[in-house]
Amino acid sequence: MPLHIVIGAQWGDEGKGRVVDYLSAGADFVARYNGGDNAGHTVTVGSKIFKLHLVPSGIVHPHTIGILGNGMVVNPRTLLDEMSSLRGAGVSIAPQRLHISPAAHLITAAHRAVDKALESARGKGQIGTTGRGIGPAYTDKATRRGLRMADLLASDFRDRLRAHLLESNRTLGMLSAPELEVDAEIEAFINQTSRLALYIHDVATELNLALQQGQTVLAEGAQGTLLDIDHGTYPFVTSSSTVAPAALTGLGLGQTVAREARVMGVTKAFQTRVGSGPFPTELSGEMAERLRGTGANPWDEFGTTTGRPRRVGWLDGVLLRYAVRVNGMTDLIITKLDILSGMEKLKLCTGYTVNNALVHDLPGGADGLSACAPVYEELPGWTEEISHVRKWKDLPKNARAYLERVSALAETPIKLVSLGPEREQILAL
Ligand code: IMP
């Protein structure tokens, strides 16, 4: 019953897309269980770069079936665009290999408009959302007035959509934001969504059966542990559960399948964050520019969804250990080790001082993070270029020592190290 769950161990953008692509070679199903098109997963295959926001990254492998689970919020426009650009790149996208849960929620133009209006109303307290309507769509889900994929097949869908748009216009009015043209939005939305009806599928039954029959399901988490609505740096978080246990509820799987699940946590060899919120190991100046890159390369630290420059810093071992705990992580996957090549000295955060006291775990969960000052351990860097390395023994001694220290801090074995954007630039341990 192999269920493998890939989650982000940081604030998202850890490189999960390329890891999922690598692991998909051995998977039958690749399933997204949370979030929506706020995610941006990049997969590089030869000269082709796929930037995926909704379709699971494993779809690039022709033998897989891609699943969009009930825990997701789906923007039909983004999904259709993505499906068509994948087809254009030669990837087969058909109802036989892309299945959407009837219980996944829909994102409308009204959700996006309310998201942006709420952000500007927050003023200095902005979260820095992606503006994709994620929060308002999950709000409607929680308040039980959301629109779901199954509703597309209902005879009164047009009326429900109208009620949703009128209600959203009242909210936009209260926020002094421009209202939407209801009739035009209805026509555009129905035109888009009618093309998705064929892809609605009972994915929960399908995945349970697949696991019973010994097939492999790879659950692809979006965002990261520290953006989780409960376990992240609230309120600077996304609106979904991003952690590994959410793969069960977000796909309709029961607890028993989790017993033998592997939970693979992906972390960069350093730390990044997009949007507002605490970040104890954040760097500025020359060192930050060195880690971020200029934006000239697709792998530089600029958001896949928004293009915003990411905040960067040293790897935070305290947060990593926290991510190990809340996810039940069994394996650690390190990405972008190659970016550290050529740095004379590296720092790893091993603890914090809070009110002059030294701590090695998060005081009071991620909420208490803004009061924490990092305590660093310094390690020697390496000068060698490592992107071609495929064996542990061929890594420079100091690179091995850095990884060993990270693994010890996380109390979790490292199973994969990524050394570049290409499919083959992965070292398996
Ligand atoms: P939202 O998910 O658009 O509501 O944004 C909430 C917070 O999560 C903001 O700080 C975003 O920058 C961040 N965020 C959302 N999705 C991602 C992602 O895929 N990678 C990194 N940060 C994200």
Image (tube, helix red, strand yellow):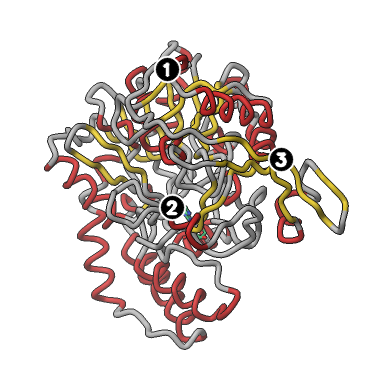
Numbered disc 2: secondary structure: helix
* Amino acid, disc 3: Thr
**Picture coordinates of residue 218 (x, y %)?**
43, 26
Where is residue 333 drawn, in percent x and y?
50, 29
User: Marks 1 and 3, Cα distance to the nearest angstrom?
Assistant: 27 Å
Counting from the top left corner in percent of width and height, residue 51 is at: 28, 46
Q: Are marks 2 and 3 in contact (CB under 8 Å)?
A: no
Is the CB atom of the residue marked by disc 1 within 8 angstroms of ligand 1's nearest atom?
no
What secondary structure is marked by label 1? helix
Does 142 sit above or below residue 55? below
Residue 410, quarter of the rendered image: top right
Which is more N-terminal, label 3 or label 2? 2
Dot 1: within a 10 Å radius of its alpha carbon, few (fewer than 14), some, or many (20 or more) residues?
few
Mark closer to the observer (1, 3): 1
Identify the residue at image location x=23%, y=41%.
49
Q: Which residue is mark 3?
A: 350
Q: Is residue 213 above or below residue 174?
A: above
Residue located at (27% from left, 69% from top): 186
Decide if residue 103 is on the left or right side of residue 404: left
Q: Is mark 3 within 8 Å of ligand 1?
A: no
Q: Which residue is mark 2?
A: 290
Q: Is residue 69 visible?
A: no
Q: Pointer 3: residues within 10 angstroms few (<14), some, or many (20+)? A: many
Numbered marks: total: 3
Asked whether residue 56 appears in the rendered view, the answer is: yes
N-terminal label among 2 and 1: 2
| CB contact under 8 Å: marks 2 and 1 | no
Residue carrying label 1:
394
Instruction: Answer with the quarter of the image where residue 26 lies.
Output: top left
Distance in Å between CA atoms under marks 2 and 3: 22 Å
